[in-house]
Amino acid sequence: MACGTCANENAYKAVFIWYRTKQRGGSMPSKEDLESCMRDMPPGSPKLSILSFQGGFHGRTLGCLATSHSKPIQKVDIPSLVWPVAPFPQLRYPLELYAEENRREEERCLDAVWKIIVESKTTGQPVAGIVVEPIQAEGGDHHASNTFFRRLQRIAKDNDAAMIVDEVQTGVGLTGRMWAHEHWGLEEPPDFVTFAKKMLIGGYYYKDEFRPQGGYRIINTWVGDPAKLVLLEAVIRVIEEDRLLDNMRETGDVLLEGLRTLENKYPDVLDGSRGQGSFCAVDCPTEAVRNKLIYALRNKGVQAGGCGERTIRCRPALIFQPHHAEMFLDIFNGVLAQGNIR
Amino acid sequence: MACGTCANENAYKAVFIWYRTKQRGGSMPSKEDLESCMRDMPPGSPKLSILSFQGGFHGRTLGCLATSHSKPIQKVDIPSLVWPVAPFPQLRYPLELYAEENRREEERCLDAVWKIIVESKTTGQPVAGIVVEPIQAEGGDHHASNTFFRRLQRIAKDNDAAMIVDEVQTGVGLTGRMWAHEHWGLEEPPDFVTFAKKMLIGGYYYKDEFRPQGGYRIINTWVGDPAKLVLLEAVIRVIEEDRLLDNMRETGDVLLEGLRTLENKYPDVLDGSRGQGSFCAVDCPTEAVRNKLIYALRNKGVQAGGCGERTIRCRPALIFQPHHAEMFLDIFNGVLAQGNIR
């Protein structure tokens, strides 16, 4: 597939096909299914949903938009399927100070997921799958614990829903592992992992049981782009040869430690430093302050980015090394020291 | 955009944004719009639709699928938005024998379009736009007259609906013009023309009034692929220098004349020869016969394709010349002469 959005759209489709096939006891679609879908009516066009999270982002085509809830500008004026949305944990930092509070927050979110899925079975629109980012990236770099994701997988499994891990932003090394979900210690692999960006081509990998029977169900005109696979092979070779995953962990340690130091030094401007590998972020008190900082950094030669409403995100290339992180932190300190940000 | 599907998804979104902006008297989204869209509820997530045609195909993501009605295998088991679908003319060939019948058939379809749009205004889900292919390609190479399309544009205009011409298959030369809709003699250009395939990149061009106010409304990560524009420039240069549009018309004359001759010679196997430029097709009595012919052609070195249920479609490259058409017709005649097709 050409992009991450297309990867997600097709993963959703594969989940729906899997769910309906189970409901039919493994049979292919019936004559009634084939006829009714041409009128966009059940049973051929079933009432099923993908459960997503508040603050999540999975793309901007109409199917993906029904699961994206990070910013109104992406959704407003566009008709939507109405699918359930669960709260995603809003953790407090530093984590060690708020362990019990954060545990309760994750509990609250998992309870909501469980309740939505169980109730959906009686409302005529069952949840066929869950889609989740390892770190809610567009939404403002919201993390959750490894335990949260392990329990989320358990809830999906117990309720016959598939679990799609959207690694379009987190995949391919930035978190210090090839895939962010490798940090979680899952009982079994996710049902689907979707990818794009650093993979240079969009797509997903998945468990065998999710392969639709028969042909022409998940397909497109291009059916891939072989030249990009050659490029990807080179990318993966360099990641291995140059130990770039190790580099992302080592750089991330410097980056996060540095952000924490700046946060302690400028507590009225920075807050909530967090990260996994070099996938780091820090919050500002308001959107205006965040944008002011980003412009100031740009004027010093640093291309920083925002996410969520008031977060600065670090998304360095895999070749960004500890001494580059020091350079960035030094410039960031200089910008903050000017003292005219708020 | 990366593909034709993505082009259509975004054209639909631009239509919805335009329609809602008009409803607001030109204002940006209200606070209520921005809040309600995050819950996928009106007015932020409005109840609006894109009207499409039976037999049409516009892609396989969830938004496009709601407008695709060519084959059940593409739709079955996937939840859908429920948007209105109008009949597309089923013309009889040769056209000169069935002029009056075909005129009535087109009238019937236009009446249905008009009725659906007018009624949609009172049902709480107005039609914001119409999407139509110049030739229904996946659906079985269904053509309609230039008058049909001119009147369709008039109906859209009179009812404040946008008209999207999906030229993903018909665009870039095969019909003997750069864009198939150039044949129609429209009063004014279409509101949107979507493209991909031979353009090497997906996208749409559109009238100024459909440009959303403000940024970040129609956008994606890649925001284009400059290398493909360099390739496209070369494609367009060669089309002009080698007079490939003329070539498609000249080759098409040979191709269509040849298909008609074969149809007269083998009337129990071929029927309904039709074409525009080299975008030609012929029907078989059944899907089984059609597939048998395609396999027999392949065994003689011709890669032919099917569309609809029982149609053979010709989609030659722009460099396919009259003498290539003669070679194809000769092989096709040889396959038909074996007499063991039915």
Image (cartoon, coloured by chain):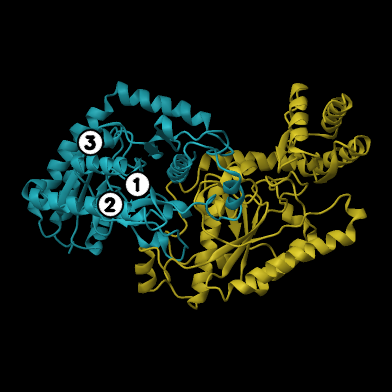
Chain colours: A yellow, B cyan
> Pointer 2 and pointer 1: residues touching (CB < 8 Å)?
yes
Report whether A47 appears left or right of B335: right
Front-most of residues A201 and B135: B135
Q: Where residue B113 sits in the image (x, y, percent)? A: 27, 52
Q: Which residue is mark 2?
A: B113
Q: Which residue is mark 1?
A: B130
Q: Where residue B297 sits in the image (x, y, percent)? A: 25, 52
- Identify the disc placed on residue B184: 3
Whole-number angstrom distance, CA of label 1 to CA of label 3: 17 Å
Q: How many marks?
A: 3
Q: Is residue A110 above or below residue A271?
A: below
Lower position in the chain sequence, tag 1 or tag 3 = 1
Share a chain, discs 1 and 3?
A: yes
Residue ID at (39%, 52%): B126
Front-most of residues B254 and B176: B176
Q: Nearer the viewer, mark 1 or mark 3?
A: 1
Q: Look at the numbered disc 2 and give the secondary structure of its residue.
A: helix
Q: Where residue A68 sits in the image (x, y, percent)? A: 61, 51
Whole-number angstrom distance, CA of label 3 to CA of label 2: 19 Å
Report whether B51 appears left or right of A141: left
Report whether A64 appears left or right of A31: right
Report whether B16 appears left or right of B193: right
Q: Is residue A158 above or below residue A60?
A: below
